[in-house]
Amino acid sequence: EAQVTQNPRYLITVTGKKLTVTCSQNMNHEYMSWYRQDPGLGLRQIYYSMNVEVTDKGDVPEGYKVSRKEKRNFPLILESPSPNQTSLYFCASSLRESTHEQYFGPGTRLTVT
Amino acid sequence: KQEVTQIPAALSVPEGENLVLNCSFTDSAIYNLQWFRQDPGKGLTSLLLIQSSQREQTSGRLNASLDKSSGRSTLYIAASQPGDSATYLCAVNDYKLSFGAGTTVTVRA
Protein backbone atom coordinates (compact mmCIF):
# COMPACT_ATOMS: atom_id res chain seq x y z
CA GLU A 1 0.00 0.00 0.00
CA ALA A 2 1.33 3.42 -0.97
CA GLN A 3 1.78 5.44 2.17
CA VAL A 4 3.71 7.87 4.31
CA THR A 5 4.53 6.54 7.76
CA GLN A 6 5.65 8.41 10.85
CA ASN A 7 7.04 7.20 14.15
CA PRO A 8 6.32 7.61 16.93
CA ARG A 9 2.67 8.58 16.70
CA TYR A 10 2.63 10.01 20.20
CA LEU A 11 5.54 11.30 22.25
CA ILE A 12 5.79 13.02 25.61
CA THR A 13 9.23 14.30 26.50
CA VAL A 14 10.98 16.86 28.67
CA THR A 15 12.64 20.12 27.76
CA GLY A 16 16.11 19.68 26.31
CA LYS A 17 16.00 15.96 25.60
CA LYS A 18 16.93 15.38 21.97
CA LEU A 19 14.41 13.48 19.88
CA THR A 20 13.89 12.30 16.33
CA VAL A 21 10.61 11.77 14.51
CA THR A 22 11.00 9.45 11.57
CA CYS A 23 9.19 9.73 8.25
CA SER A 24 9.26 7.20 5.45
CA GLN A 25 7.45 6.93 2.12
CA ASN A 26 7.23 3.96 -0.24
CA MET A 27 6.13 5.81 -3.37
CA ASN A 28 9.59 6.76 -4.70
CA HIS A 29 8.72 10.43 -4.20
CA GLU A 30 11.42 13.02 -4.61
CA TYR A 31 9.81 15.83 -2.60
CA MET A 32 9.26 15.53 1.15
CA SER A 33 8.35 18.08 3.80
CA TRP A 34 7.45 18.58 7.44
CA TYR A 35 4.57 20.63 8.84
CA ARG A 36 3.34 21.49 12.26
CA GLN A 37 -0.31 22.13 13.05
CA ASP A 38 -1.35 24.38 15.91
CA PRO A 39 -4.83 25.60 16.91
CA GLY A 40 -5.53 28.99 15.40
CA LEU A 41 -2.35 28.90 13.28
CA GLY A 42 -3.19 26.08 10.92
CA LEU A 43 -0.52 24.08 9.12
CA ARG A 44 2.90 25.64 8.68
CA GLN A 45 5.85 24.20 6.83
CA ILE A 46 9.00 23.55 8.83
CA TYR A 47 11.45 22.14 6.26
CA TYR A 48 11.30 20.60 2.84
CA SER A 49 13.54 18.49 0.64
CA MET A 50 13.54 18.50 -3.15
CA ASN A 51 15.64 15.34 -3.32
CA VAL A 52 18.39 13.42 -1.57
CA GLU A 53 20.88 15.74 0.13
CA VAL A 54 18.82 18.83 -0.82
CA THR A 55 16.90 20.47 2.02
CA ASP A 56 15.67 23.99 2.69
CA LYS A 57 13.85 25.97 5.35
CA GLY A 58 10.13 26.45 5.36
CA ASP A 59 8.21 29.07 7.31
CA VAL A 60 9.07 27.96 10.87
CA PRO A 61 12.46 26.17 10.86
CA GLU A 62 13.81 27.49 14.18
CA GLY A 63 14.59 24.70 16.64
CA TYR A 64 14.42 21.91 14.06
CA LYS A 65 16.88 20.01 11.89
CA VAL A 66 16.36 17.58 9.04
CA SER A 67 18.43 15.29 6.90
CA ARG A 68 17.76 13.44 3.65
CA LYS A 69 20.35 10.73 3.20
CA GLU A 70 17.99 8.35 1.44
CA LYS A 71 15.12 9.08 -0.91
CA ARG A 72 12.50 7.34 1.21
CA ASN A 73 13.39 8.80 4.64
CA PHE A 74 13.18 12.33 5.97
CA PRO A 75 13.64 12.46 9.77
CA LEU A 76 12.82 15.55 11.83
CA ILE A 77 15.26 16.24 14.65
CA LEU A 78 14.64 18.40 17.70
CA GLU A 79 18.06 18.89 19.30
CA SER A 80 16.76 20.66 22.41
CA PRO A 81 12.95 20.59 22.50
CA SER A 82 11.07 23.35 24.26
CA PRO A 83 7.41 23.56 25.35
CA ASN A 84 6.56 25.83 22.39
CA GLN A 85 7.34 22.88 20.12
CA THR A 86 4.37 20.99 21.54
CA SER A 87 2.32 20.41 18.43
CA LEU A 88 0.92 17.94 15.90
CA TYR A 89 3.55 17.18 13.26
CA PHE A 90 2.93 15.90 9.75
CA CYS A 91 5.28 14.57 7.14
CA ALA A 92 4.25 14.84 3.49
CA SER A 93 5.62 13.70 0.16
CA SER A 94 4.94 14.25 -3.52
CA LEU A 95 6.27 12.85 -6.77
CA ARG A 96 8.40 15.82 -7.75
CA GLU A 97 8.59 19.34 -6.43
CA SER A 98 5.88 20.82 -4.32
CA THR A 99 3.46 21.32 -7.21
CA HIS A 100 2.38 17.71 -7.37
CA GLU A 101 -0.33 16.12 -5.25
CA GLN A 102 0.74 15.95 -1.63
CA TYR A 103 0.38 12.80 0.49
CA PHE A 104 0.42 13.18 4.25
CA GLY A 105 1.44 10.85 7.03
CA PRO A 106 -0.81 10.09 10.03
CA GLY A 107 0.80 12.69 12.28
CA THR A 108 2.91 12.69 15.43
CA ARG A 109 1.54 14.36 18.52
CA LEU A 110 4.44 15.75 20.51
CA THR A 111 4.18 17.13 24.03
CA VAL A 112 7.21 18.82 25.59
CA THR A 113 6.96 19.46 29.33
CA LYS B 1 2.21 36.16 0.59
CA GLN B 2 -0.67 33.83 -0.23
CA GLU B 3 -3.60 34.11 2.19
CA VAL B 4 -6.18 31.31 2.20
CA THR B 5 -9.57 31.78 3.85
CA GLN B 6 -12.24 29.19 4.48
CA ILE B 7 -15.77 30.20 5.32
CA PRO B 8 -17.67 29.16 7.32
CA ALA B 9 -15.40 27.93 10.11
CA ALA B 10 -18.04 25.42 11.19
CA LEU B 11 -21.15 23.95 9.68
CA SER B 12 -23.85 21.65 11.05
CA VAL B 13 -26.39 20.05 8.73
CA PRO B 14 -28.94 17.22 8.90
CA GLU B 15 -28.12 14.01 7.09
CA GLY B 16 -28.99 14.09 3.42
CA GLU B 17 -28.42 17.79 2.92
CA ASN B 18 -25.83 18.94 0.37
CA LEU B 19 -22.69 20.61 1.75
CA VAL B 20 -21.05 23.66 0.24
CA LEU B 21 -17.60 24.59 1.54
CA ASN B 22 -15.82 27.71 0.36
CA CYS B 23 -12.15 28.54 -0.05
CA SER B 24 -10.73 31.85 -1.22
CA PHE B 25 -7.14 32.84 -1.94
CA THR B 26 -5.43 36.13 -2.63
CA ASP B 27 -2.88 35.32 -5.35
CA SER B 28 -4.28 33.68 -8.48
CA ALA B 29 -0.87 32.56 -9.82
CA ILE B 30 -1.25 29.01 -8.55
CA TYR B 31 -0.27 25.55 -9.83
CA ASN B 32 -3.12 23.68 -8.20
CA LEU B 33 -5.50 23.52 -5.28
CA GLN B 34 -6.01 20.49 -3.10
CA TRP B 35 -8.87 19.63 -0.76
CA PHE B 36 -8.16 17.48 2.29
CA ARG B 37 -10.22 15.86 4.99
CA GLN B 38 -8.93 15.64 8.56
CA ASP B 39 -10.55 13.59 11.30
CA PRO B 40 -9.89 14.68 14.91
CA GLY B 41 -6.27 14.05 15.87
CA LYS B 42 -5.63 12.26 12.60
CA GLY B 43 -3.74 12.84 9.40
CA LEU B 44 -4.84 14.56 6.22
CA THR B 45 -6.56 12.55 3.52
CA SER B 46 -6.42 14.00 0.04
CA LEU B 47 -9.88 14.30 -1.48
CA LEU B 48 -9.42 16.16 -4.75
CA LEU B 49 -6.65 17.94 -6.60
CA ILE B 50 -7.57 20.58 -9.19
CA GLN B 51 -4.87 21.77 -11.54
CA SER B 52 -4.82 25.46 -12.39
CA SER B 53 -5.98 24.68 -15.95
CA GLN B 54 -9.07 22.82 -14.73
CA ARG B 55 -12.45 24.26 -13.75
CA GLU B 56 -13.66 21.31 -11.71
CA GLN B 57 -12.87 17.83 -10.48
CA THR B 58 -15.25 15.11 -9.35
CA SER B 59 -14.94 11.99 -7.23
CA GLY B 60 -18.08 10.15 -6.20
CA ARG B 61 -20.26 12.49 -4.14
CA LEU B 62 -17.55 15.15 -4.13
CA ASN B 63 -17.19 17.92 -6.65
CA ALA B 64 -14.71 20.76 -6.45
CA SER B 65 -14.70 23.82 -8.64
CA LEU B 66 -11.94 26.34 -9.21
CA ASP B 67 -12.22 29.93 -10.42
CA LYS B 68 -8.65 31.13 -10.49
CA SER B 69 -9.45 34.63 -11.70
CA SER B 70 -11.67 35.34 -8.71
CA GLY B 71 -9.50 33.35 -6.29
CA ARG B 72 -12.20 30.91 -5.26
CA SER B 73 -12.79 27.20 -4.94
CA THR B 74 -15.89 25.41 -3.73
CA LEU B 75 -16.20 21.86 -2.48
CA TYR B 76 -19.65 20.31 -2.86
CA ILE B 77 -20.56 17.14 -1.00
CA ALA B 78 -23.84 15.65 -2.17
CA ALA B 79 -26.29 13.88 0.12
CA SER B 80 -24.21 14.23 3.27
CA GLN B 81 -23.83 11.35 5.73
CA PRO B 82 -22.74 11.27 9.39
CA GLY B 83 -19.46 9.75 8.20
CA ASP B 84 -18.73 13.01 6.37
CA SER B 85 -18.28 14.75 9.74
CA ALA B 86 -14.70 16.04 9.76
CA THR B 87 -12.63 19.14 9.16
CA TYR B 88 -12.10 20.02 5.51
CA LEU B 89 -8.97 21.92 4.55
CA CYS B 90 -8.12 23.57 1.27
CA ALA B 91 -4.49 24.10 0.30
CA VAL B 92 -3.33 26.39 -2.47
CA ASN B 93 -0.09 25.54 -4.22
CA ASP B 94 1.96 28.37 -5.72
CA TYR B 95 5.17 26.33 -5.40
CA LYS B 96 4.49 26.37 -1.71
CA LEU B 97 1.46 24.89 -0.03
CA SER B 98 -0.65 27.41 1.91
CA PHE B 99 -3.50 26.05 3.99
CA GLY B 100 -6.77 27.53 5.06
CA ALA B 101 -7.87 27.15 8.68
CA GLY B 102 -10.52 24.64 7.68
CA THR B 103 -14.27 24.15 7.92
CA THR B 104 -15.46 21.74 10.61
CA VAL B 105 -18.52 19.87 9.40
CA THR B 106 -21.02 18.02 11.57
CA VAL B 107 -23.67 15.91 9.86
CA ARG B 108 -26.51 15.10 12.25
CA ALA B 109 -28.21 11.71 11.90
Image: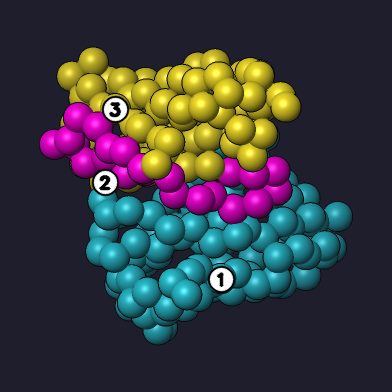
Chain colours: A cyan, B yellow
> Going by the picture, which residue comes out furthest to the bottom?
A70
Q: Identify which residue, B77 or A29, lies in the foreground.
A: B77
Label 2 environment density (alpha carbons within 10 Å; few <14, some 14–19, many ≥20): some
> To which quarter of the image does residue A54 belong?
bottom left
- Badge 3 and badge 1 in a common chain: no
The answer to whether residue A82 of the structure is visible from this angle is no
Q: Secondary structure at mark 3?
A: strand
Pointer 2 residue:
B95
Label 3 environment density (alpha carbons within 10 Å; few <14, some 14–19, many ≥20): some
- Badge 2 and badge 3 in a common chain: yes
Region rendered in magenta: B38-59
Image quadrant where one finds the C terminus of chain B: top right
Pointer 1 residue:
A5
Residue in view at x 48 percent, y 69 percent:
A3
Q: Are marks 2 and 1 in contact (CB under 8 Å)?
A: no
What mark, if any, has residue B80 been given in the picture?
none
* Residue type at tag 3: Ser
- Badge 2 and badge 1 in a common chain: no
Residue A16 in picture, x, y percent from top left: 77, 65
Q: Secondary structure at mark 1?
A: strand
Q: Give me the C-alpha separation between circle 2 and circle 1.
A: 24 Å
> To which quarter of the image does residue B53 belong?
top left
Residue A106 in picture, x, y percent from top left: 60, 60
Protein chain holding label 1: A
Q: Identify which residue, B88 or B19, lies in the foreground.
A: B19
> To which quarter of the image does residue A19 belong?
bottom right
Pointer 3 residue:
B65
Protein chain holding label 2: B
Q: Taking A112 as reference, is B81 above or below it?
A: above
Q: Identify which residue, A78 or A109, lies in the foreground.
A: A109
